Image (cartoon, rainbow, N blue to C red):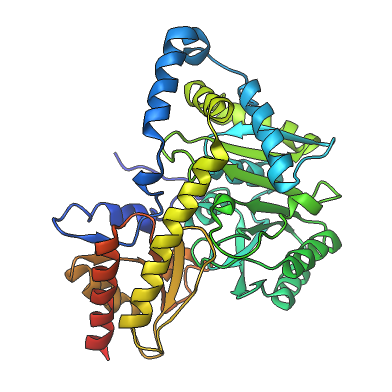
Amino acid sequence: MEYKISDKFVNMKPSAIREIFKSLGKPGCISFAAGNPSPESFPVEEIRKITSRILSEEPITALQYGVTEGYPKLRELVSARLKRVYGIGSDDDETIIVSGGQQGIELTCKVMCNEGDVVISENPSFIGALNAFRSLGAKLVGVPLGDDGMDIAALEKALAENPNAKIIYTIPSFQNPAGITSTLENRKAVYALASKYDVVIIEDNPYGDLRFSGEDVPTYKSFDTEGRVVYCGSFSKILSAGIRIGTLTANKALVSKIVVAKQVEDVHTNMFFQMVCAKYMSEYDLEEHIAKIRKLYSHKAGLMISALEKFMPSDVKFTRPDGGIFLWCSLPEGYDLGEFIKRCSEKNVFVVPGTAFLPDESETTRSFRLNYSMPSDEEITRGIKLLADVVAEMR
């Protein structure tokens, strides 16, 4: 039969990153395209012990339905850690467990936005969030991202020109894809504009725990006095991506509506893995584990930056992140990004084109994203050399 796809989805495109994954089966390929945490960061042995004990001692709780808001013990532990580490959580806030940070973003937009309402995001931004907003009929307006965060003048212009703007979406720490961290001054300026124009801020912070240099910057939620910030966190980068456990912290009034929206989607987040997370936090030293991940990524990021400095010509620009798992490269004027990506793939090296991260899909860019958490040390050095060879060939 001929399917009549809904207006919301008829023009939706698959994630460029997920599509690239389909091409990574060739022997010897080097992928800088993933957004995955390093397998070395998984506490496999500890999780093996925890899962065995859960199934021996609490199988019914693990295998039965749970409440939509999340496993009570995990919510308690997450709330305490957010308060201790990030200064997040007031008497008017509530923390719930969601199926990955991605669901928290999507649910907030679903609750806040009518079709045609505007979501303002950094440009470039996380493709998963952009597609979630698109799928709900929201209009995306991108604001350029500078070294210190969102362009404040451009943000105010976007807010003034779009009175139906409902959300500012930001990844302020080790941004995906750019690797940039917004300064405190920039964050306070963004918050002031959100207050002036009465919009909600979605603070997406899956990489905040992965700082390996520099000083921590206070989260938006830590200085939120108006219930204006929805904070989305995740266990994906600090424990396991596959368990799909995320967190959402916001004003109780907004959370009550988000809970209803979640009941429509999945009833509740996977109970078994919520229990795994809770027991890991209770019985092991999560902060010590995170410190090991930071050390690992510090080494890998340093190796990639050194290789870029050694092999790439000086007119290829790249960011130098203080944490997270990505950096952002930009080719000089006159280069065709599509041709560059094609030639790289012919050499069995894969990167994500910057076009995947643009709020305006008709826009062009000469930039691409590199991931350093997944490839081995040898792959990082050899892969960057191959990318530099393509730049030289195209010159």
Q: Which residue does the image show at 22% across and 75% down from the upper left?
A: 343
Question: In this figure, what is the number of numbered marks?
Answer: 0
- Residue 237 position within the rendered picture, expressed as x and y whole percent measured from the top left: 48, 46
> Which residue is nearer to you in this view: 359 or 376?
376
Q: Quadrant of the C terminus?
A: bottom left
Note whether residue 258 is visible.
Answer: no
* Depicted 239 relative to depicted 322: above or below: above
Q: Is residue 88 left or right of residue 360?
A: right
Note whether residue 239 is visible.
Answer: yes
Q: Which residue does the image show at 68% across and 56% down from the upper left?
A: 117
- Residue 198 position within the rendered picture, expressed as x and y whole percent measured from the top left: 82, 57
The quadrant where residue 49 appears:
top left
* Depicted 55 relative to depicted 118: above or below: above
> Which residue is nearer to you in this view: 310 or 393?
310
- Residue 333 position within the rendered picture, expressed as x and y whole percent measured from the top left: 41, 90
Q: Which residue does the image show at 44% across and 14% down from the upper left?
A: 53
* Depicted 383 relative to depicted 286: above or below: below
Q: Is residue 241 left or right of residue 205?
A: left
Q: Is residue 353 left or right of residue 339?
A: right
The residue sitting at the left extreme is 27
Q: Quadrant of the N terminus?
A: top left
Q: Is residue 83 left or right of residue 324?
A: right
* Depicted 363 relative to depicted 83: above or below: below
- Residue 390 position within the rendered picture, expressed as x and y whole percent measured from the top left: 24, 80
